[in-house]
Image (cartoon, grey):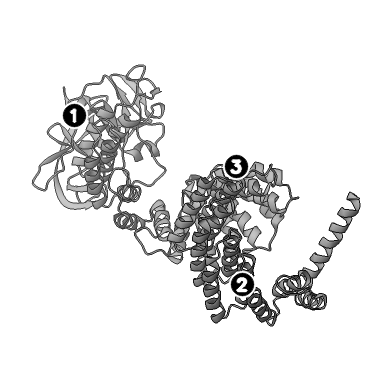
Amino acid sequence: MDLSQCIFPIYNGGTIIGQGFIADGFFITAAHVVKNYPSCFFNLNGQRIELDKKAPINFIDDVDYHHDSQMEDVVMFQFKGTNSPLHLSEYIPQKVDKLASHCMREVIDLNSINPSSSYELSIIPAYPLEKEEGNYFYCECNRFAASSGSPLLKGNEVVGIMHGGDDKGICAFLKMGSVLYNIGDFYFHYVYDPLDHLNVFHAIPTPDYKEAFRWYMKAAANNYPQAVYQIAYCYERGKGVDKNWEEAIVWYTKSASQGHVESQFALGNHFFNGEIVSQNYAKATYWFRLAAEQQHTMSLYKLGLCSYLGLGFVKSYHYAEKWFHLAVEGWEAYKEYAPPELRLAYYYLGLCCLNDKTSALPPYFAVYYFQKAGNLNEALYYLGICHKNGWGVPNDYKQAFLFFKKASNIYGEFTHKADYEVGMCYYKGKGVNQDYKEAVRWFKKAYDCDDAIFQLGVCYYRGQGVEGCYEEALSHFYKLAIKGNIRAQRFVGELQRRLGEFQKKKYRIERAIEWYKKLLSQGYTDSLWSIGYCFETMGNIGYHDKFDEAIHWYKMAWTQGDLEAIGDINNCFEAIFNLGYIDKCKEAIIFFKQAWEHGIIEANRYIGNCYKAMFNMGDKEKIKDAIIWYKKAAAFNDDRACRSLSIIYKNGIGVPVNEQEAKKWIELADKYNPISKILSDQRKKEDGESNLHTK
């Protein structure tokens, strides 16, 4: 086929304004020709083809192709069924090549009586120079007028497209990479199925990924970075080629190393997420930083996220704030195209203001940023927190309640936390009337939130908004306890002990001990007392041998600074005394005397109790020792010791009855503890009324 049959002059009216050609089923010309002359056309097989009636396979942006070397001055239309000897090549012209620029030139026959014009193919030698600029390379080549869009050939292979030239014989040609890539992109997204090769195209979404991949490979061979990126994407997703993540990383790295910003971001994102390559935050931040240097806004945002979370960087709210600011500035310039991350960036800016103690920004800026984030669940939640705690705004529970309600209606990270906060407002009556039943409803709604689970446990434990139920409370606390929640572990221990006591089930108390020992292993030494209390409870429900173990654990609690544990030790000894074990009295006396030497004043009374127990078990001489130690305790204003002395003298326990002495000691007891006197008088009155009623 003659080359003149596939290269065409393009007209505007009767004037030639450029050239175009058909190769591999596409009509191709310079974009500035079509943009500058919207009504242009060319003639194909005697038919007038109006280009404004055709759908181009690539976009023609409103840009100045003549003055921006990065712009790809090409527009393409699919023409199925048209044959052409020309083929689009990935070959990169070399300085040693002798190429040929082809265009159709008008020839006027001046020798004819009626001068007429015709068109003939002109072939002009072109010699590549070492000069390149953006998407263009240069050749030493003469140029006819209106030749923009004409092909530069090496044989029948198109290796460049005429862009323009000067009067010094230097012409600029568009590199083929962008042409090959755009065809690949056309096949990747849609294949146009025209009614016939001249008609308007109708888009049918039937991508041909294999054909797309083939053209991307050709474009990549022409050193077109976007094509290299797209090949990586195809390997990653298995589009037109078998899925191969290792190969995807190779191609992403190749493109990123050529400075392709989307590839740099993609590599950073893959290392950040650990999706198709092992997670590596240091590598992620390396590629994000390279992309950020090219003002890639999403990379700026990701660097902010890495700084905020301390991933690949030392955690820094200060630097996170700077990165997020840059991202926001970039997105705000094109707000209508901004991704959802714009609102997240504002949200994180708010968090930076709250968390960065060195920030020069006042706290109300956090509220401002949260408001800029709009109806973002996380931002609404924190607006509620700010109003609840008075951060940057006056403390206002009503406003907090409203923001928590709004956040609860929008799905997001803090939906269930917002549900919980609404429940707490009802529980405490903050910003809304107190309503335990409504609180329980919201806690159940927020059940994915650990705080809500805990609070439900509290409600069942206390019978608030629901019927009190230790078993139900235990089930909620247990869910948190096995996840390591310390408060929940304490409740599980206490509830198992109580249930064991009520049900007289030893195994439940043993489970409580296991939980307290778990707490003890985590450094919570107050569990020593709790373990002692569990053993004491077991003793009280019939397992009397456990009182000794209770004393052992109470003693350890006492040595760890729990001074009140000595009273519990006394209770256990008294329980043992009541069982008739007189030998334990001597052991108790030795311990309490040591406690007295350590400054425990109550030890005097406890020693008196031991001697009184020995008297009760038959050693009648010990009542004298009991009186001596009670009097020692009374000297330190111990009202209970005074009350014990009063009982001894009033009832003649081991001594003659002495009403005067009994009265003296009870008056001292009431003096040392007036509250005890009031309670005693009230009990006497109630007992008298009860006797009167009985009569």
Distance from Cα at disc 1 to Cα at disc 2: 119 Å
| Mark earlier in primary sequence (1, 3) | 1
Amino acid carrying label 3: it is Glu
Above or below, comparing residue 461 to residue 191 in the picture:
below
Looking at the rendered image, the disc whose residue lies closer to the viewer, 3 or 2, is: 2
The residue labelled by disc 1 is: 86
Residue 269 x, y percent position in the rendering: 34, 49
Q: Nearer the viewer, mark 1 or mark 3?
A: 3
Q: Residues within 10 Å of mark 3 (few under 14, many from 20)?
A: some
- Which disc number belongs to residue 144? none
* Disc sitting over residue 472 in the figure: 3
Q: Residue furthest left?
A: 96
Left or right of residue 683: residue 411 = left
Q: Quadrant of the N terminus?
A: top left
Q: Tag 2 or tag 3, which sits nearer the N-term?
A: 3
- Tell me what residue is drawn at x 30 percent, y 29 percent: 187
**Residue 510 visible in the current orientation:** yes
Residue that mark 2 sits on: 611
Local SS, label 2: helix
The residue at the far top in this view is 195
